[in-house]
């Protein structure tokens, strides 16, 4: 992927103008979500790792510069782009932490052209990854003791998204992924069973079950719903008993009334003395189904959760924004109806349990007993430390999510903790809005 | 991207078993969508190009094989994987054509292990790209003479998806994209205006407008809603008149009541004698908004359509499936409740206008006056011809979509053309289901 042109044309236009005018005074942009989607009381921050990688490698290649020249950018501008790297500072919410509406997920301070050019990539990674991490965390929240496995890869929006979903669902507490390349890349447990095609490729279902056990050494999950599900369970029982298997075993239900079938399946297994054989379900599931399984006390041990998490089906995007909050020493805001912004570089202060965050100016002191949520992650274009491991992000996710009040953690119609605007920020917002209104005086 | 492990673990498990048993007899898999999402009367086929690229490059690298060995696959299996390439045949619906529920988008015939291993990647590309191409086509259908520009890149699910969305929206008839890398890669017109940050970076709005005109040679679209929208329009008018601009000009409305603001804006521009200055709108739009603009006769010339198309917001995935329909000479089907499949390799026959397609066995002759929809695109692992240009796909899309009856093209509550199952296919389905039911006989 060539970094320099991986942006929107208007970023290049604006950057060209800033370079031409020497408007290099540092600009601070704040990336935040204006409003939470329906049924979301909180978000789980994600996408930062990919943002930092993109910022570190940001540059225009020769072929990018050729394209820009052909597209009409003048020589001085193209020369300006040629030397451009990202040299700014970044503060951000570490991946896995809870974030609320209006709270910055990330703030960039850099020369205006640089800060502008990276807008598209930063919004892209943070928006979809935060949406998906949130959906996965909601699944984990609603699933009780059930083990969850990421089955999303076949219906994510591309291969890159599939890798991200495996990583994000691991941050949210999923136990494994079906995505083998992601398992290798991120060191995650890989999990997989068999498809209906495998069962159909053999003369009888039971032949397929036997062949699978003979050919593969590891755990076995028998897919039992290719024909009649309960007959399939009996075929699995027969194979398990005939072959005296001593490895982790499960049967997988992928269609029909999963709660009823799980009960009947559990009964068949128990009557055969196979109490340790687990019941695994799949098929278009998300947090609403998982919650129902728990409420109905279905004897389900594990679930493959795929498509709906992998695209965050009920909230596939977020109302994210990357807004200029200061230019040089001057705080700025826009006044667009429904899209007005708060000026100034900010910090979020949090205490536990998370009943009310405080959104303050960066230089303000936090209230007693509150901890700052944004941390410095990049200085002068260089990444600081490493907050980047999946395990660390998972710990942060567990810590924050378990600190949310029960009505915030609710899957349906949750409330959201209040985000209180500090006195300093409120005063600056009033002053800045007043001066913004004067910026349209044509007679000035 | 390393191809061999870009799959689900169960594909590797099944492939290992097929290789071990010498079950190389050709398997035919059919990729189709079981049911159309709400408010969809048709789909626009897409994703084939990426599928063919993936199939051509399919192979296990040394590091893939190392991972497989570490994961417990035995030496013979790993050696089997080492030599594996995709050597099969593919027939598919060319990109841009209309497809309906149950109609194969793609059929693979290959040695069982190969056909199985590529399932995940084929489903991935076809599913999301078809969902997005369909959403974009619906926007184009509902937008009358309005010009549409792809603004999705900042909120697609990753960079790869952003590139795909630019390409797919061009197939659907969008005029340009904001995504610069996609514009270069696919030879598309790039379009862009300015952001609110640019306006805020200057002392006054009008200073920003003047600077942009001075610094950039091409068309100018003034973003007028940073502060008060109609005052912004007057600032743009002042700049256009003072600087006697002779290039394509527009003002862009990005917030508020777009229909009312477009009317007031048009009036201000017309009263200033600026009839050629266009009104451009943006801000969370999709086909439902575009249809409303047309119905309310809003004086809107062009729209930036982004997030909701880029994630196909109301249908971010499709109920797609990749199902075994024949193994060797034997047609197969599954009987799972709600997910039963039709056996055998198929062809779709279509006549114009598209009131009823016929779904038949591949070897059956089509009805008089009908044309076949699936074409051979790959033989023995080699791509045939090139159906791959965006322009050709756009022509196919226009031809099919304009041939749909009005009630199918409706944005809300459309009907869908009937897909009639041929006599040959119906008879085979009955026979195969009957024999499938016998595949669970444990006493056999």
Image (cartoon, coloured by chain):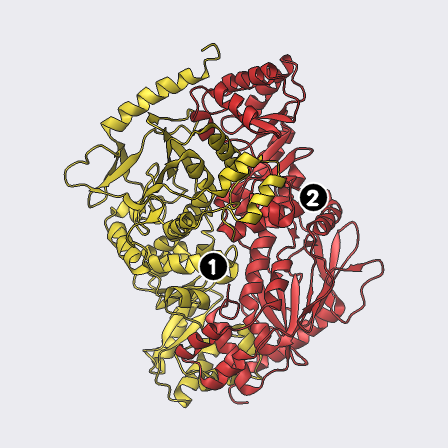
Chain colours: A yellow, B red
- Residue extending farthest to the left is A368
Query: Could you confirm whether marks 1 and 2 are on the same chain?
Result: no
* In the image, residue A158 above or below residue A147: above
Q: Residue at x 55, y 83 (%)?
A: B19
Q: Nearer the viewer, residue A161 or A16?
A: A16
User: In the picture provided, is B259 more to the left or to the right than B363?
Assistant: left
Tell which residue pokes out farthest to the right in this image. Answer: B368
Q: Is residue B384 visible?
A: yes
Disc marking residue A289: none
On the image, the x and y values in percent for residue A174 come to 35, 62
- Residue A296 found in image quarter: bottom left
Task: Using the image, determine if residue A162 lies above or below residue B223.
Answer: below
Residue B374 location, quadrant = bottom right
Side of B45 where B195 appears, left or right:
left
Q: Nearer the viewer, residue A114 or A251?
A: A114
Decide: is A117 above or below B113: above
Residue drawn 31% across the image and 20% down it: A431
Mark 1 packing: few (<14 Cα in 10 Å), some, or many (20+)? many
Horizontal side of residue B98 vs B293, given as left or right: right
- Distance from Cα at disc 1 to Cα at disc 2: 36 Å
Residue in the image at 65% along x and 55% along y: B45
Could you tell me which secondary element the residue under label 2 belongs to? helix
Q: Chain of mark 1?
A: A
Residue located beneath label 1 in the image: A162
From the top left corner, tell me how far across and down residue A267 is, in percent.
37, 75
Identify the chain of the residue marked 2, using the numbered disc in the image: B
Q: Which mark is residue B407?
A: 2
Q: Position of residue B119 (x, y in %)?
A: 56, 68
Where, quadrant-wise, is the C terminus of chain B in this rendering?
Answer: bottom right
């Amino acid at each position: 992927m060539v970094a320099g042109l991986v942006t929107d044309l208007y970023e290049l236009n604006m950057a060209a103008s800033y370079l031409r005018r020497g408007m290099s005074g540092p600009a601070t942009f704040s990336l935040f979500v204006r409003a939470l989607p329906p049924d979301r009381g909180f978000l789980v921050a994600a996408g930062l790792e990919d943002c930092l990688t993109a910022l570190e490698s940001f540059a225009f290649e020769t072929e990018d510069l050729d394209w820009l020249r052909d597209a009409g950018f003048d020589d001085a501008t193209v020369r300006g782009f040629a030397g451009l790297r990202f040299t700014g500072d970044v503060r951000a919410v570490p991946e896995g932490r809870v974030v609320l509406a209006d709270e910055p997920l990330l703030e960039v301070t850099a020369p205006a052209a640089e800060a502008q050019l990276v807008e598209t990539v930063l919004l892209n990674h943070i928006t979809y990854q935060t949406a998906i991490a949130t959906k996965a965390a909601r699944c984990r929240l609603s699933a009780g003791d059930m083990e969850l496995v990421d089955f999303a890869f076949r219906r994510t929006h591309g291969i890159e998204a599939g890798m991200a979903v495996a990583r994000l669902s691991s941050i949210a507490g999923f136990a494994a992924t079906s995505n083998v390349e992601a398992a290798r890349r991120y060191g995650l447990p890989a999990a997989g069973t068999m498809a209906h095609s495998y069962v159909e490729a053999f003369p009888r279902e039971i032949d397929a079950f036997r062949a699978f056990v003979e050919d593969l050494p590891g755990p076995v999950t028998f897919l039992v719903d290719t024909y009649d599900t309960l007959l399939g369970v009996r075929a699995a029982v027969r194979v398990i008993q005939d072959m005296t298997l001593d490895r982790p075993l499960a049967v997988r239900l992928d269609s029909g009334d999963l709660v009823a079938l799980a009960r009947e399946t559990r009964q068949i297994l128990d009557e055969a003395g196979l109490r340790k054989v687990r019941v695994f379900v799949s098929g278009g599931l998300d947090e609403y189904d998982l919650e129902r399984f728990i409420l109905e006390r279905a004897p389900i041990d594990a679930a493959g959760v795929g498509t709906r998490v992998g695209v965050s089906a009920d909230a596939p995007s977020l109302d994210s924004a990357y807004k200029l909050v200061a230019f040089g020493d001057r705080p700025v805001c826009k006044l667009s109806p429904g899209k007005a912004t708060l000026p100034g570089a900010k910090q979020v202060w949090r205490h536990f349990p998370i009943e009310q965050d405080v959104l303050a100016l960066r230089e303000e002191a936090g209230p007693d007993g509150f901890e700052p949520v944004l941390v410095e992650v990049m200085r002068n274009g260089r990444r600081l430390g490493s907050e980047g491991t999946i395990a660390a992000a998972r710990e942060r996710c567990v810590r924050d999510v378990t600190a949310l009040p029960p009505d915030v953690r609710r899957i349906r119609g949750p409330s959201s903790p209040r985000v209180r605007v500090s006195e300093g920020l409120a005063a600056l917002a009033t002053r800045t809005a007043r001066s913004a209104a004067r910026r349209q005086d044509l007679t000035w």
